């Protein structure tokens, strides 16, 4: 026999807002994205979107524009380089997810940009470090051939 919950408890579960605590790893990632955003703004980029979610799994960390080029930016934050450069974490699967999100993003635009590219920004430092090491890798990877751009 299935135990039934009181109706008030079910209603309270439905209307209660669900806030999740931010983990230390997520906080470091958010800090890295903000550091990358400041860096890009200082170098003439206009930030169009932050943490753009497209679909269930696909997310673009930053969408920026520079001189008419739409730039999809993947930000990788690490405390140090003990286990290699942060860019090494942008493996084939991550490139595929980013490319898929970018193509979906482009399909949703009213006006298509003349060009776009994928960049990676490496942020190396501890949370709230006043001067992290930031490396910007332009044209980090191409659009895989199996994706079609509108």
Image (spheres, rainbow, N blue to C red):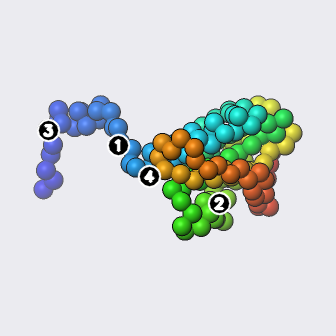
- How far apart marks 3 and 2 lie (CA) works out to 52 Å
Q: Secondary structure at mark 2?
A: helix
Of the numbered discs in the image, which one, if any, rests on residue 21? 1
Of the numbered discs in the image, which one, if any, rests on residue 6? 3
Of the numbered discs in the image, which one, if any, rests on residue 25? 4
Picture residue at 15% right of the left edge, 53% below the top: 2
Residue neighbourhood size for the residue with mark 3, other residues' Cα within 10 Å, grouped as few (<14), some (14–19), many (≥20): few
- How far apart marks 4 and 3 lie (CA) works out to 38 Å
Closer to the N terminus: mark 4 or mark 2?
A: 4
Picture residue at 44% right of the left edge, 52% below the top: 25
Picture residue at 13% right of the left edge, 50% below the top: 3
Q: Secondary structure at mark 4?
A: helix
**66 left or right, relative to 16:** right
Residue neighbourhood size for the residue with mark 4, other residues' Cα within 10 Å, grouped as few (<14), some (14–19), many (≥20): few
Q: Position of residue 119 (x, y in %)?
A: 72, 50
Q: Nearer the viewer, residue 123 or 55?
A: 123
**122 left or right, relative to 138:** left
Q: Secondary structure at mark 3?
A: loop
Give the mark toward the camera: 4 or 3: 4
- How far apart marks 4 and 1 lie (CA) works out to 11 Å
Q: Nearer the viewer, residue 42 or 30?
A: 42
Give the mark toward the camera: 1 or 2: 2
- How far apart marks 1 and 2 lie (CA) works out to 28 Å
Identify the residue position indicated by label 2 in the image.
Answer: 87
**122 left or right, relative to 142:** left
Q: On the image, which quarter does residue 85 sit in?
A: bottom right
- In this orientation, does residue 90 appear? no
Closer to the N terminus: mark 1 or mark 2?
A: 1
Closer to the N terminus: mark 4 or mark 3?
A: 3
């Amino acid at each position: 026999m299935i135990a039934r919950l009181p109706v008030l408890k079910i209603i309270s579960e439905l209307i209660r807002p669900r806030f999740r605590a931010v983990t230390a790893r997520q906080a470091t990632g958010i800090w890295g994205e903000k550091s990358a955003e400041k860096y890009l703004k200082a170098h003439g980029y206009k930030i169009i979107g932050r943490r753009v979610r497209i679909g269930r799994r696909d997310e673009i960390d930053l969408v920026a524009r520079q001189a008419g080029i739409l730039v999809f930016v993947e930000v990788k934050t690490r405390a140090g380089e003990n286990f290699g450069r942060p860019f090494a974490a942008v493996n084939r699967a991550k490139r595929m997810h980013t490319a898929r999100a970018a193509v979906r993003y482009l399909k949703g635009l009213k006006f298509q940009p003349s060009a776009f590219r994928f960049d990676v920004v490496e942020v190396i430092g501890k949370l709230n470090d006043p001067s992290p090491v930031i490396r910007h890798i332009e044209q980090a990877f191409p659009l895989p051939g199996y994706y079609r751009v509108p």
